[in-house]
Amino acid sequence: MPLTHEEIAAITGDIAATNLPVISELPATPELPAIPSLPDSPPRTPSPHPSEYSSHDHDSPSPTCAGPLRETNSSSWAARNSTRPVLRPRTPPPRLTDAQKASRKIKRDQKHEAAKRLHDGVTEYLNEQRLKIEALARTHNVTSKHINDIIGSQTNYHKSRKPQLINALVHAKAKEMNADQPAGSRYTLAELREMVANDPQTKKLSREEAAAYIEALNEHRDQKGFSVRANNLAAARDAVATTERLVKELDDLRIRTSIYATLFVVRGHINDTIQSTMYGTDNTEDFWEDVYEHPMADFLRQYEQWACTQNQSKFLYYTRKQARRLIARGLVAVTGKKDISMNYNNYDTAIVETYGVRIVGWPHGVKFTSPSNIGTVGDIRKLRDALKNCTCYWTALSQAEVRAHAAELDMRRSAGEVVRKPRKKRSDSGVPRKRKVPPTTVQASQENRRVSKKVKRTALQPRLAPKSSEFVESSDEDVE
């Protein structure tokens, strides 16, 4: 369901995000203009991948911002994630001529005819199999269903196979042969397999060379998993295909296990061209009206508002916080000191020279300073990603490296360079202040002595009544 004009204005910054209407104020059946959908897309279109978002509203930066944020490109998911690899869209092939269209029609008709013959052959085989199964059932006194279960037993869960050497060689051959080929004239998979089979060099590979080919294929598959789509159209198609698979899996899981599930998929940025969608198994949509007295579509609209506005002003603050935490944890881990803190102003002397450790892989183009002083979203994201991916990390120096670093600092000092930045003076520096008289040994021991809980309770809460009776009456024997 599309957003209202006020909601879109709130997202783009014309109205404060805190003034967005709550669910109780939403109309039950709003009459709003529909957002144009993507071409050739089903009625239910999903949203992009939910993840972190770049700062879009620069008019309300975080309170901890060191300076104004520079304008960044936020037109697509790939532009907002410049540090990640991009899956390049496939170039469409050139238009076909009339002769090519006629030739392809002949091939298509031939394929249809071959498929029909195959279908007829499979049907004949299945009929014969059915007769044989019925004969086996009568012979062994079992049902036909029992035999069919034995023959067609399979599992819905499959383990992912390790990459084989033949696939790795085909991948390497494809990169070699199709790198400079234009769209429409690249070699097919069957042709590449034939090239690999006829190549004598692939039959003389050592174990190390085969492992290198397999490792290259693994890296390619991993890169496809965490890369981002190049433009909004590619992201929308990926979201549509993935959501359709999720819906089918949830339907199948519902049939197998009788579960109930709800799926909300919304766009993550106002510039994304994807409509949001919702899905529920069986009669799940009745839950929202029965319990919350609002249709499921109202929650979808609120979810879309939240996704498009959250992190716009807080993203820089939280990313800085993550970077500071990762740097501090790495420093504690490499030195083994829990009470150590990072010193950026005197890093060469207070950290490297004193503890013999150094941070390696600081991102290129990012100033070496505290993450709190980095004022651009792109730079702080680049630093945070490098720390999370362990391309920027702490390492311990050898004794020779520590001595070389100390010699370098001595040379800089002898050249007149201020190596260690002096501490900032107090505002009342030079003004005499009254000194505290140091306590004597007896007073210090009395102050540092730990008072037990029983003594504290006795001192703070005086006893109101005696433990025993205040007056004891004489017995009869004492009176006589």
Image (cartoon, grey):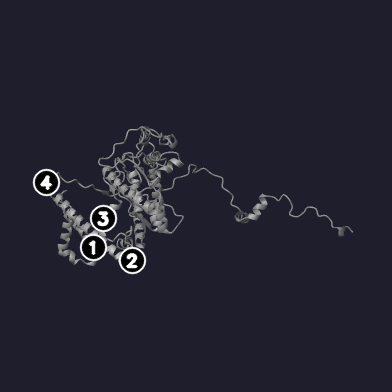
Mark closest to the chain's N terminus, 2 or 4: 4
Quadrant occupied by the C terminus? bottom right
Q: Which residue is denoted by mark 3 in the rendering?
A: 220
Q: What is the distance, in whole Å, between disc 4 and disc 3 at their CAs?
A: 38 Å
User: Of the residues under marks 2 and 3, which one precedes in the sequence?
Assistant: 2
Q: CA distance from mark 1 to mark 3?
A: 14 Å
Q: Please identify the quadrant where the N terminus is shown.
A: top left
- The residue to which callout 1 is attached is 165
- Horizontally, residue 441 falls left or right of residue 174, namely right
Q: Is residue 284 above or below residue 135?
A: above
Mark 4 or mark 1, which has the lower sequence index? 4
Residue 411 is drawn in which quadrant? bottom left
Outermost residue toward the right in this view: 480
Q: Nearer the viewer, residue 241 or 84?
A: 241
Q: Residue at x 36, y 34 (%)?
A: 4
Using the numbered discs, state the Cα–Cα distance from disc 2 to disc 4 in whole angstroms: 58 Å
In the figure, residue 315 lies in which quadrant? top left
Disc 4 marks which residue? 102
Label 4 and label 1: CA atoms lie apart by 39 Å
Q: Is residue 21 above or below residue 153?
A: above
User: As rendered, which of 32 and 426 lies closer to the eye?
Assistant: 32
Give the residue type at disc 1: Leu
Give x and y (percent) for residue 311: 38, 42
Q: Amino acid at mark 3?
A: His
Report x, y in % for residue 178: 17, 53
Residue 391 can be seen, yes or no? yes
Q: Residues within 10 Å of mark 2 (few under 14, many from 20)?
A: few
Q: Which residue is mark 2?
A: 141
